[in-house]
Image: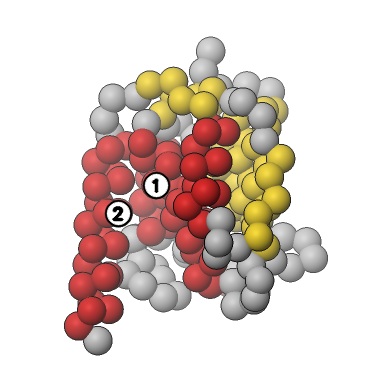
Amino acid sequence: MALQRIDKIVEKINDIKSLEEASGKLKVVNVAEIVNSTVDKYGEEAIFTLKTQDVFVEANEALKSALDNIVSNAILHSQVNPVQITINLFTEGNECVIQIADNGVGIPDEIKNKIFESGYSRKGGGLGLFLVKRIVEMFGGKITVRDNVPKGALFEIRLPLKS
């Protein structure tokens, strides 16, 4: 029990660190490299399908934390084995689009609007997706969630392309 509480505290410290990083200096980053790094980290915990291309945005290390959070949530909350996660990275107009979809139980419609609020959580301390949203917004983007077809959740992050 004490170790679980310590793990949660460490997780929250890392979340706060991510938000601090997001407010730091921005640089041009290749989102495909961040996606690949995240997949490497979780490669043994899920089956990944990737469709990516080199896409450049102005961001920093906090973008990696945001993607990490979404992928780790998919693994934690999916309630299926094996978890299958599909990541599509492409451009649309003047935007970078990152879609992260899983084959889990999905997110009920009645809580889709709440999951990005501070303190909301199905499991854990409730800062994760709130901070993900804040990070994405700090980079001039937006994040949404909808049902994945045939099942699961699909998170979509849209960021302005580096001009």
Which label sits on residue 145?
Answer: none
Q: Find out whether the residues at labels 2 and 1 contact each other: C-beta distance under 8 Å.
A: yes
The answer to whether residue 140 shows anywhere in this view is yes
Q: Position of residue 145 (x, y in %)?
A: 60, 55
Give above or below for 80 relative to 75. Answer: below
Give the image quarter of residue 95. top right
Seen from the viewer's position, the closer of residues 74 and 84 is 84
Identify the residue at horizontal 36%, vertical 51% (top origin).
Answer: 131
Give above or below for 117 relative to 40. Answer: below
Q: Secondary structure at mark 2?
A: helix
Q: Position of residue 101 (x, y in %)?
A: 66, 56
The answer to whether residue 113 shows anywhere in this view is no
Residue at the far right in the pictured view: 150
**In what quadrant of the picture does the N terminus appear?**
bottom left
Which label sits on residue 65?
Answer: 1
Identify the residue at horizontal 54%, vertical 23% (top origin).
Answer: 56
Of callouts 2 and 1, which one flags the residue occurring earlier in the amino acid sequence?
2
Q: Position of residue 13 (x, y in %)?
A: 22, 57
Q: Amino acid at mark 1?
A: Ser
The residue labelled by disc 2 is: 15
Seen from the viewer's position, the closer of residues 127 and 73 is 73
Q: Amino acid at mark 2?
A: Asp
Q: Position of residue 104 (x, y in %)?
A: 65, 70
Q: CA distance from mark 2 to mark 1?
A: 8 Å
Give above or below for 32 relative to 133. Answer: above
How did the renderer colour the structure? secondary structure
